[in-house]
Image: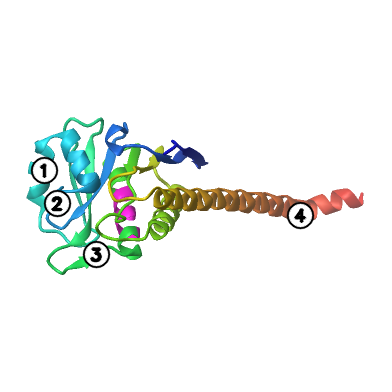
Amino acid sequence: MSRRRSDYKINNAIFRVEYGDITGVMADVLVSSDDSHLSMGGGVSASLLRAGGDMIAQEAHKHVPLGLGDVAVTSAGKLHARYIFHVVTIDFKNLSYASAETLKLATSRCLELADTLGCRTIAFPALGTGVAGVPFHVAAETMTRKITDYLYDDTRLQMITLTLLARENVRDKDLNMFYERSVALATLATQSRRLTSLFDELSRIVNVQKQPALLLKEDR
């Protein structure tokens, strides 16, 4: 599969969508998708455990049990990061799986936690698209909208990355769908904000020209 990457400047930050292995990303925070026991037994969580070492699992087990959408914070072990945020997308106790609302809540919590901890960079996988079964286009839309909206508010984050990896049982066309949907939404978000800024500036100019002092000056 070809490597693809797209960057978008949003306020003072960069939003990046790319193909790659999240275990190799250098960021303050790496986000993992896991079950309510934080077993780190498959998908992105297992990859992070293998690369980061057993201490991550030992720390994670102190947080269980958790519920859908919860986020637990551990160190990142040997990875090039400060923290791992473990997002629960499968609830074994209630036999429930992540939905679009779960991803929206979890993405928001991760971004807020990163800001609270003074982090500047954070990398997400395609949350919930493995065993949890969230459709790739739903995950792309939910996460991208939340991330772009967040960056237009007050935040210290400077880089947010969505990292897509072709793993076992994941079809290339599903990753391509996620990438293309996310890129399209990010493009629309930036264009929409630019248009809004232009209209606001035009409105300001028109209002200034309508001020009485200016009109009197022109009459003379």
The kind of secondary structure element at disc 4 is: loop
Q: Residue furthest right?
A: 220
Question: For mark 3, does the 10 Å Cα neighbourhood hold few (<14), some (14 to 19), or many (20 or more) residues?
Answer: some
Task: Return the mark for residue 38.
Answer: 2
User: Residue drawn at (9%, 37%), measured in percent from left and top?
Assistant: 55
Name the amino acid, label 4: Gln
Question: For mark 2, does the 10 Å Cα neighbourhood hold few (<14), some (14 to 19), or many (20 or more) residues?
Answer: many
Front: mark 3 or 4: 3
Distance, label 3 to label 4, CA atoms, is 58 Å
The kind of secondary structure element at disc 3 is: strand
Q: Are marks 2 and 3 in contact (CB under 8 Å)?
A: no
Q: Which residues are magenta?
A: 104-112
Pointer 4 residue = 211
Name the amino acid, label 2: Leu
The kind of secondary structure element at disc 2 is: loop
Pointer 1 residue = 57
Residue 85 visible in the shown view:
no
Q: Is residue 25 magenta?
A: no
Distance, label 4 to label 1, CA atoms, is 65 Å
Distance, label 1 to label 3, CA atoms, is 22 Å
Spot occupied by residue 197 in the image (x, y as percentages of width and height): 62, 50
Pointer 3 residue = 97
The kind of secondary structure element at disc 1 is: helix
Asked if residue 138 lies left or right of residue 27, the reply is right
Question: For mark 1, does the 10 Å Cα neighbourhood hold few (<14), some (14 to 19), or many (20 or more) residues?
Answer: many
Distance, label 1 to label 2, CA atoms, is 8 Å
Nearer the observer, 20 or 207: 20
User: Residue drawn at (73%, 50%), measured in percent from left and top?
Assistant: 205
Q: Are marks 1 and 2 in contact (CB under 8 Å)?
A: yes
